[in-house]
Image (cartoon, grey):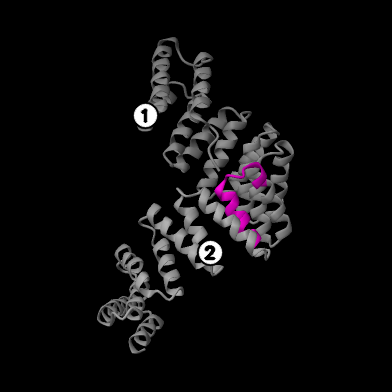
Amino acid sequence: MSLRITISALLAGLCLALSSNLTVAQGQSQQLSDLLRQGRELVSAGNFDQALQLYQQAAQLDARNPRIYSAIGFIYAQQKQYGPAAQAYQQAIALDQQNPDFFYALGFNLGMTGENHGAAAAYRQAIRLNPRYVQAYQGLAVILARLGDTQTAIQTYRQIIVMEPRNWEAFQSLGILYLNQGDMNQALTALRQASQFVPDNPNVQLNLGQVLLQSGDKTQGLAALEQAASLGQGDGNIQLTVGKVFLLQNDYQGAIRAFQRATQLLPNSTLAYIGLGETWMMLKQPHEAVLPYQTVTRLTPNNPEAFYNLGVALKASGRKRESREALKVSESLYKAQGNKEGIQKVKNAMKN
């Protein structure tokens, strides 16, 4: 879900606010004009901290201008300060209750702070003011799904499709909701439709592949995952997810390829290295698992499971002394946690 209030829209709104300003005394008009102009320039340049200071000064000069507060909200949102952003949009709405963009932005920021019921109410008001506000429907559907109201979320995505029959994101979201409900037929229909509209989108292929696999079509499912991996070669998260699915499907060579790409793209991702190590162990090549497991211990030096996995791989590789050292570290860390099961697991590994 992305913020629809773009910089260009913000600047246009501020220009309108400036030209229609009737609440500022004549002596302050030039000062306000300068503040808004400089603020617009700073926003365009991405200098949000200084821009925020200028808009806050402008609000002191013209406290009845809703677009100044919307600009402040926009800047806070760009800085990921969603709480203050929501407060700024609430101030804008108090001055102009007929602007659907303000309600949309409020919904977005409330949603980002976890105030889901308030977000849903804001999105619904945006839709009342503009019944064809597709982005507001999208935001509402996301919040409804988050609240567990899956059926209404599905209906909302269906409304989007009526307005925009080629909206692939709505079809993809529908597919995911149906998948979560266990309705594989509807999920496949929706995701295949999304795939027709954007055949080169790796996320769509990834979701389609997972649904095909869960539907029992292993051949097409793995083919879709291969396509997702190929299309998303530069996306570490896609490679990581593909690797996990391949591993679950016992396609170890596919998992190795995906996890290796994931480690290159996400060099600090312990999940990628763990997946790679686990896959090598499944292939009964523990010597290959040693390096990724060593990397995990460097990334998470207080993780007893990381040292346990390394110890097991070293032992299976015939490196018994190093294995014992790693297992002793694991045992010490488990003791620090008071994890009796972990301690016993390590002792069993040392015996066998």
Which residue corresponds to mark 2?
246
Residue drawn at x 68%, y 55% as measured from the top left: 150
Q: Nearer the viewer, residue 311 or 164?
A: 311
* SS at badge 2: helix
Q: Say what amino acid the circle numbered 2 marks.
A: Phe
Was residue 197 drawn as part of the magenta stretch in this picture?
yes
Q: Position of residue 25 (x, y in %)?
A: 45, 13
**In what quadrant of the picture does the C terminus appear?**
bottom left
Residue drawn at x 36%, y 84% as measured from the top left: 349
Contact? badges 1 and 2 (CB < 8 Å)? no
Q: Say what amino acid the circle numbered 1 marks.
A: Gln
* SS at badge 1: helix
Residue drawn at x 67%, y 66% as measured from the top left: 216
- On screen, 52 above or below 117? above
Which residue corresponds to mark 1?
53
Q: Which mark is residue 268?
A: none
What residue span does the magenta drawing correspond to?
Answer: 194-213
Was residue 260 drawn as part of the magenta stretch in this picture?
no
Q: Nearer the viewer, mark 1 or mark 2?
A: 2
Instruction: Calculate the distance from the C-alpha at mark 1 to the C-alpha at mark 2.
Output: 51 Å
Residue drawn at x 63%, y 62% as measured from the top left: 219
Sequence-earlier tag: 1 or 2: 1
Q: Position of residue 63 (x, y in %)?
A: 47, 24
**In what quadrant of the picture does the N terminus appear?**
top right
Quadrant hosting residue 213: bottom right
Quadrant hosting residue 53: top left
Q: Nearer the viewer, residue 323 or 47?
A: 323
| Residue 67 seen anywhere in this rendered image of the structure | no
Q: Position of residue 90 (x, y in %)?
A: 54, 36
